[in-house]
Amino acid sequence: MAYRINYLDGDTVNDTQKVVTSTWTNNTNDLVVSTNNTSSTQASFTAATSSGAHYIEVYNTGITSASAAVQFSVAYGHKAGSGSLDFTNDTGAKGNSPSRNIYNQYRQLVFGDETKNFSFPSTGTDAFTPDDIYVININRSRYKNNLKTSTLNLTLCTTNSLETGDDANKLILTDDSVTSTGSAEITNVGRQFNLVSGSNGVRLGDSNVQVVGSGSYGLYYPDAGFIILNPAALKHRLTGSDFPISPGIGANTADNNPQKLLNAISGGGSFIVDSEEKNQL
């Protein structure tokens, strides 16, 4: 016979616990990404209509392995469509390209409005509004209910730090959820945090929040599983020549910009972030 506890008016009982695991396959804590962990078929920039012209899927290992699974994708968006091939060369089609699609997709997700642009806080001035963005989108099956705040530690490097030990062109990014507790903005896709230089949700000093004149490093959306990066800030901070991160912005040109972000992630050699899942008792 089942018995029910008799609750009083106003009582609330929390019977939900959260299970936290690494986001990556096999509960791997730190994903070390190689530029070889992609599909040469999918990551093709030769045609404007190909999926690779829009994003590159990144696997946990080489795709010939039986354990290969997509972990995240990288993309580049430009509000005028620069940096990728136009879908057609017809009159009036200028700028209708994969990069424009990507920019419109993410501002529609965040703002619910294709007229608003991504802006990043800038020291001493109004928010900086670049023409373009980089995107890291965690595979939906990987992040469960949401990514856990304060666990993001993403290393970008424009030299191969694993081989050279170079720290001069290395940047470790995290969200500012610990340093700025309760400061998250609420968007159409849930919470939005700033990306800052630091680790485990803690900003490293006061001078690592943003680049003067170029705004902050980006924005973090843990409830939707993606990160928006500010190319203008990154290219000022990361000057290494091995993996230039500055995007090409040629008109009707396949500048392969998603690959530049992937190269910097590979050069950094470390991507850590946990996911949360509600466990109903």
Image (tube, grey):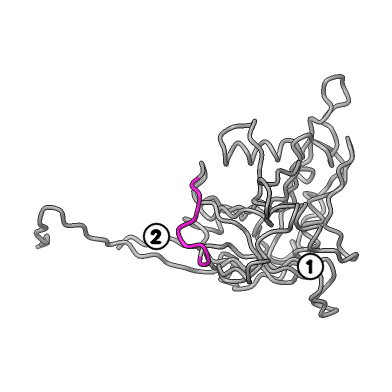
For disc 1, the marked residue is: 157
User: Which of the two residues, 28 or 123, is positioned nearer the viewer here?
Assistant: 123
Q: Which mark is residue 177?
A: none
* 18 in relation to 228, above or below: below
Is residue 263 found left or right of 175 in the rendered image? right
Is residue 135 found left or right of 113 in the rendered image? right
For disc 2, the marked residue is: 278
Q: Quadrant of the N terminus?
A: bottom left
Mark 1 lies on a secondary structure that is strand
Q: Quadrant of the C terminus?
A: bottom left
The secondary structure making up most of the magenta span is loop
* 172 in relation to 215, above or below: below
- Residue at point 82%, 37% (across, down): 48
234 part of magenta stretch: no
Residue kind at label 1, given as amino acid type: Cys
* 251 in relation to 6, above or below: above
- Residues in magenta? 178-186
x then y, percent, for residue 62: 75, 65
Residue kind at label 2, given as amino acid type: Lys
Q: Determine the image quadrant of residue 270.
A: bottom right
- Residue at point 71%, 43% (across, down): 129
Disc 2 crowd rating (10 Å Cα; few below 14, some 14-19, many 20+) is few
Asked if disc 1 and disc 2 are in contact, CB closer than 8 Å, the reply is: no
Disc 1 crowd rating (10 Å Cα; few below 14, some 14-19, many 20+) is many
How many numbered marks are there?
Answer: 2
